[in-house]
Amino acid sequence: MRSAEHELFAGEATSASIPTESGEITLLPHHASLVTNLHAGELVVHTNGKDEQLFVGGGVLEFTPNNECRVLADVAERVDEIDEKAAEDARKRAEESIATAKSEPEIAAAKAALWQAIARLRIAEKTRRIRR
């Protein structure tokens, strides 16, 4: 899996749980070929005995007939690297941007930023609860 800046995961997996615009899907070996847009949320790569938890903030997923899964994420980071304070600040900025936006494109961009911030906060909170 790659973000615009770097690769976060490469290797074999037994399955992957992916947040798409149509809802969460799970890809297993020999899944039908697929190209879909990603939605902001948690992407989990299941390998033999270990889960790799990642945040994605949009992008595209391609699953090919030869069991290759490519994820090109607009924004991506490991769940344990989420900065909750920065995500909370981003949420507040996005809410302010929605309130002051003067055009539909500005509103859409602010709503996308808000959804990313909320998704980061939810994932960080869930991870914190699990680790307790």
Image (cartoon, grey):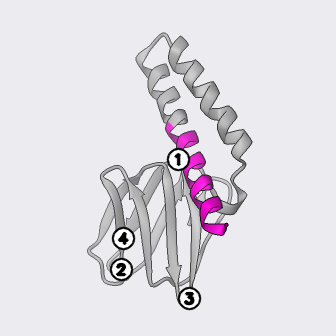
Q: Does the magenta segment cover residue 13?
A: no
Q: Find disc 3 in the rendering and name its residue.
A: 49
Name the residue type under label 3. Gly
Label 1: element kind? helix
The part of the chain drawn in magenta is 115-132
Vertical relation: 40 (above or below) 79: above
- Which residue is nearer to you in this view: 16 or 73? 16
At horizontal 42% and vertical 63% (from top left) the residue drawn is: 18
At horizontal 72% and vertical 48% (from top left) the residue drawn is: 83
Q: Find disc 2 in the rendering and name its residue.
A: 28
Q: Find disc 4 in the rendering and name its residue.
A: 26
Residue 12 left/right relative to 66: right
- Mark 4 to mark 1 CA distance (whole Å): 19 Å
Neighbor class of circle 3 (other Cα within 10 Å; few <14, some 14-19, many 20+) is few
Q: Find disc 1 in the rendering and name its residue.
A: 119
Number of numbered discs present?
4
In the image, farthest residue toward the front: 132
Residue 74 visible, this orientation: no
At horizontal 34% and vertical 65% (from top left) the residue drawn is: 25
- Which residue is nearer to you in this view: 132 or 122? 132
Residue 113, image x, y percentages:
55, 34
Residue 60 left/right relative to 119: left
> Considering the image in quadrants, where does the N terminus appear?
bottom right
Name the residue type under label 4. Thr
Neighbor class of circle 1 (other Cα within 10 Å; few <14, some 14-19, many 20+) is many
Q: Are marks 4 and 2 in contact (CB under 8 Å)?
A: yes
| Secondary structure mainly formed by the magenta segment | helix
